[in-house]
Image: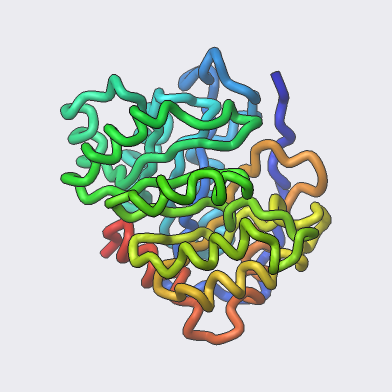
Amino acid sequence: MKSCLPPDANPIKPINKLPPGACDAHCHVFGPASKFPYAADRSYTPPDAGFEELVRLHDFLGLSRGVIVQASCHGTDNTAMVDALQRGNGRYRGVAIVDGAVTDEQLADMNQQGVRGVRFNFVAHLGGAPDLDVFDRVLGRIHELGWHVVLHLDAQDILAYSDRINRIQVPFVIDHMGRVRAEGGLEQKPFQELLELMHNPLAWVKVCGSERVSVGRRPFDDAIPFAQALIEAAPDRVLWGTDWPHPNISKDMPNDGELVDLMFRFCKDPEHRRLLVDNPARLYGFP
């Protein structure tokens, strides 16, 4: 079982000041394991990175809001994520991981706590594709709640599951720019398929995870053309987040202040900065 590196404990102060209401639309809370144990069948073990640390980071960077995404190391036990939503007093929304055993009562309770979507991992090193019958049933059930689904895919999965993705009837969000690889260039088939997918009015994408798209060395500038192309393709349906505390990074650990400044370099047109406030407010129901 892989152990993850801790996040950079010394983020820089971003050069660019974030606007009021700016949202980190992709971050996690891990543990603390003494209170919120990790799943026995997890593929990695992260260092504890709890709610207090997340709030300190967001306050330092100037982020008013956040979306806490359940990570696979906690499995379908969403307790740590929901606890953070409760303690955030409306500052945070959540995305859960569920299986086919989840009850209507559990979904309703999570909705009340601020959960607004479910996440499915297709990524090979996290266990590969989910049970697709469960996937379809869960998506049918979240439709009535007005939730969306987050798809964590490897780049080749965009091609392999394109027909199924196009059949989705709820808003869906592609994580981390589809985890395309910068060295493959803008013309690589998975990225072109992702750009084509953005014509679907239900499709959203997160221009985060630059360290995963990049060849892996800060400041990850080779991810910029991919983010810019996605932003230009669907400026009203693009989100940004830090991905703190950056699980499974084996090359160059990001500095979260630098990631804020990198995001500003994504936005050639100031209008594109709607990905910070307007877009997440619309998808997640922030006031």
User: Can residue 21 be seen from the camera position used here?
Assistant: no
Instruction: List x then y, in percent, for residue 76.
Output: 41, 25
Left or right placement of residue 96 versus residue 216 in this view? left
Task: Please name whichever residue, 37 or 228, is drawn nearer the observer in this view of the structure.
Answer: 228
- The structure's colour scheme is rainbow
Left or right placement of residue 254 versus residue 51 in this view? right
Query: What residue is rendered at 57% in x and 30% in y?
Result: 128
Instruction: List x then y, in percent, for residue 247.
Output: 65, 38
Q: Is residue 238 above or below residue 40?
A: below
**Splitting the image into 4 quarters, where does residue 68 fall?**
top left
Q: Is residue 198 above or below residue 169?
A: below
Which residue in the rendered view is the most extreme toward the top? 40
Query: What residue is rendered at 75% in x and 60% in y?
Result: 182
Instruction: List x then y, in percent, for residue 151.
Output: 47, 45
Query: What residue is rendered at 29% in x and 52% in y?
Result: 170
Query: Which image quadrant: the C terminus?
Result: bottom left
Instruction: List x then y, in percent, for residue 6.
Output: 71, 37
User: Can residue 180 be seen from the camera position used here?
Assistant: yes
Query: Which image quadrant: the N terminus?
Result: top right
The number of numbered discs placed on residues in the rendered structure image is 0
Query: What residue is rendered at 72% in x and 24% in y?
Result: 2
Left or right placement of residue 17 versus residue 136 in this view? right
Q: Is residue 217 above or below residue 132?
A: below
Left or right placement of residue 154 versus residue 239 in this view? right
Task: Please name whichever residue, 137 or 6, is drawn nearer the observer in this view of the structure.
Answer: 137
